[in-house]
Amino acid sequence: MAFLLLPAALFAQFNRQDTLRGSVTPERAWWDLTYYHLDIEVDPAQRTINGHNTVQYRVLAPGTRMQIDLQPPMELRSATQNGQNLDYKRVGNVYYIQVPENLKQGQVYELQLGYGGHPKVAVRAPWDGGLSWEEDGKGNPFVATSCQGEGASLWWPCKDHMYDEPDSMLISVTVPDSLVEVSNGRLRKVVPNEGGTHTYHWFVDNPINNYGVNVNIGDYAHWSETYQGEQGPLDCSYYVLRANLEKAKAQFKQVPMMLEAFEHWFGPYPFYEDGFKLVEVPYLGMEHQSSVTYGNKYQNGYLGMDLSGTGWGKKFDFIIIHEAGHEWFANNITYKDIADMWVHEGFTAYSENLYLDYHYGKEASAAYVTGTRKAVMNDRPVIGDYGVNHAGSSDMYYKGANMLHTIRTLIGDDEKWRNILRGLNKDFYHQTVTTQQIEQYLIKHSGLDLQPIFDQYLRDTRIPVLAYQWKNGRLHYRWEQTVDGFDMPVSLLYNGQPIELKPTTAWQHQKLKSTDDLKVQRDYYAKLREEK
């Protein structure tokens, strides 16, 4: 998701609906999602969505009640299985469906859900989820979905929890025949209908998370190219408003540059079977899988701004680089619980400086990522509350990125670091993960005890401070404002020359003449404070 600095509530209040949305309830646990066919008609004039979702699932354990999520004002209108109408009951954002009692463990069944209504309108997409019903400069409908935080159940009925993804999905969307519709995966066919509509059929050949599913509708122009990637030819397709075609062709030349940099650092693009698309939308942008959305107004930076304040943020289009970076960290490696959203945003914010590293060098990379520290608020922990659909602080972006930059510095071997990043995407390929899995992977493959560092930057709000004193020709130093056991090595610049220290939370000393020219080397995310 595009970065936004948001004020945090000091005390989060959770209710039963938060638990139903954010936890693996008994009504979710007994069945495994295998396939969706979302078949809908979108009417821009009436601002409605109506249709069906076919849910294919495998029985893992005995169960007679299934949880399907669909948020008001959308309504479930029918639930059928094997031609049998099933009873269902609404409890807030959840429908409980009574399934037959004779389901066999290991067998796959299909449930068809009929639904419709006027979905929630997104006020500030993509941070406020729902439908964006807009018009282009010529008065044509310009419509898009976005729903990461609130969930896909804002506009379609699904198993709305990140731990379980379908293995594949068919998305069929009927729209007025004057408009083009773009969703995830590859376009199989466009079928004309009576009544002035046509239906686009898109097939996703890979697992996909719920919020990654999208619908985009507009008077689009289209062109494509082929990128020769690590796994061969990758089809890249672009959909933009007709009036923006020429400037889009110029700005989107950054896509092959992005793919080259990220395949170097992270490994092969994770969805060759589905191709890569960049689609213009009436909001800033979002990481929808194989259908990345774009609204950065065809300019470099973040709406023209350099988030680092160094000048390097103007060297790339933030939305192209950041949102496409999520194909590796969000769509390939996906959090099980939104409390671990830093796995998406920390790594992808970090990808911005790796893009610079690849194309402009390590100095540009370091300047950019350390420059983004000014956005860190230290308001609350980066990791949120588990089981209640609650993300942590927006510091997950650039505090997360600077933690990773510090770890790269501690490892001190860029090829080893690159292999770790590529290994993450290989070993957790198309998987949902927890923070603990990522932590243990980095600890194992770095050979370093990084747990205190993770605890400091992800679970605490304080930036570590290296306190120091000059006494009798010696430098005395220790870590303060840290978690227990924090002992991160650090490099200082002493009169411009590096000195290596291994501080703990206990005072240590080293023979040095006092100086006013003492700094923490910038690649370590820490502060320095003299104690008189």
Image (tube, rainbow, N blue to C red):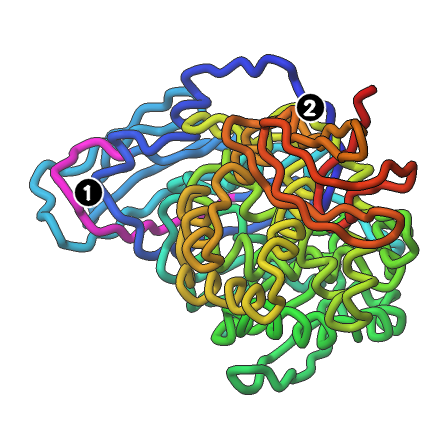
Whether 133 is drawn above or below 266: the answer is: above
Specify whether 167 is left or right of 9. left
In the image as oriented, which residue stretches furthest toward the front? 472
Q: Mark 1 points at which residue?
A: 84
Amino acid under disc 1: Gln
Query: What residue is shown with label 2?
Result: 379
What is the C-alpha distance between the residues marked 2 and 1?
52 Å
Q: Position of residue 265 (x, y in %)?
A: 61, 69
Q: Magenta residues?
A: 50-66
Quadrant in which the C terminus appears: top right
The magenta stretch spans residue 57: yes
Q: Residue at x 79, y 41 (%)?
A: 512
Under mark 2, the amino acid is Asp
Crowd band around label 2 with a 10 angstrom C-alpha radius: few (<14), some (14–19), many (20+):
some
Where residue 12 sits, quadrant-wise, is top right
Which percent across, then down, holds residue 345?
62, 46
